Image: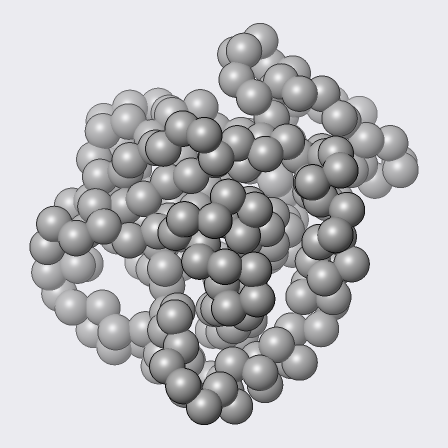
Amino acid sequence: MVQNLSGGKITSSVSSDFVNDGYSIQHTGGYALNIKLIFDDGTECTDYYKPDGSGQQLSTEKFDTILPNGKSAPSFCADLEAHQVLGGYLFDGSNHNFDDPNIVSLVAALDYINDTFGPIETNKESKAIAQIVIWNKILEVDGNAGFADDWFEDRKIVKIEGNGAWYDKYAVLVDDILANSDYYNSIYDNKSGETYISGLIFIEGDGSHNLIDQQRQIVV
């Protein structure tokens, strides 16, 4: 299956093996950077731990997906504040409700982050910035912030940012990436060399565990 996307040279080629076979997720410690949630009434949640009693940190993390061919690819949380990545995963043909233009803008943004701040596979802050952009794009597309939406009955999450001094030097750029996708698409289309990220796929749990324990992923 070839997914041809509007937006210059951005395409995502997915073989039938990658659609029909299974995936697994690996979590790597040491990549957590704190985040904050911003609500529609202007208030913020800056807790260092999720306010759901789980004891888990309210932060970015590092995930990698083991593809059907055994190779590893960087992946990102597509369910804000799910708990685990247990069991097996399957190709998500719904693309997490992303249409072609949204996929195009996300590919271009992640490639730009990788080029500008270092490889998202190994650089903690680059990985975190990419994750924050993804969460905000999901919030824009789906209109909800995943499981975190259930934590606050009287407030709606409208933005996710980094929490603390680590984020200060990235905040303006993240806002620009989210507001000016055409500009970053053009940077991607006009690159003279190879792109690091040529496309992305969406995967979801195989139903062997509760949804909150099979955090959906975006695989680049």
Give the percent coordinates (x, y) of residue 191: 49, 86
Give the percent coordinates (x, y) of residue 23: 20, 44
Residue under the point 59% across and 51% down:
129
Above or below 151: residue 101: below
The colour style of the image is one colour
Give the percent coordinates (x, y) of residue 103: 48, 68
Above or below 87: residue 12: below
Give the percent coordinates (x, y) of residue 133: 60, 54
In the displayed structure image, the side of residue 162 where residue 77 appears, left or right? left
Q: Dividing the picture into quarters, in which one does residue 204 lie?
A: top left
Whether residue 117 is visible, yes or no, is: yes
Instruction: Give the camera-side residue of 130 and 9.
Output: 130
Q: Quadrant of the C terminus?
A: bottom left
In the displayed structure image, the side of residue 204 where residue 47 appears, left or right? right
Q: Quadrant of the N terminus?
A: bottom left
Residue under the point 28% across and 27% down:
86
Residue under the point 37% across and 40% down:
63
In the displayed structure image, the side of residue 168 where residue 178 appears, left or right? left
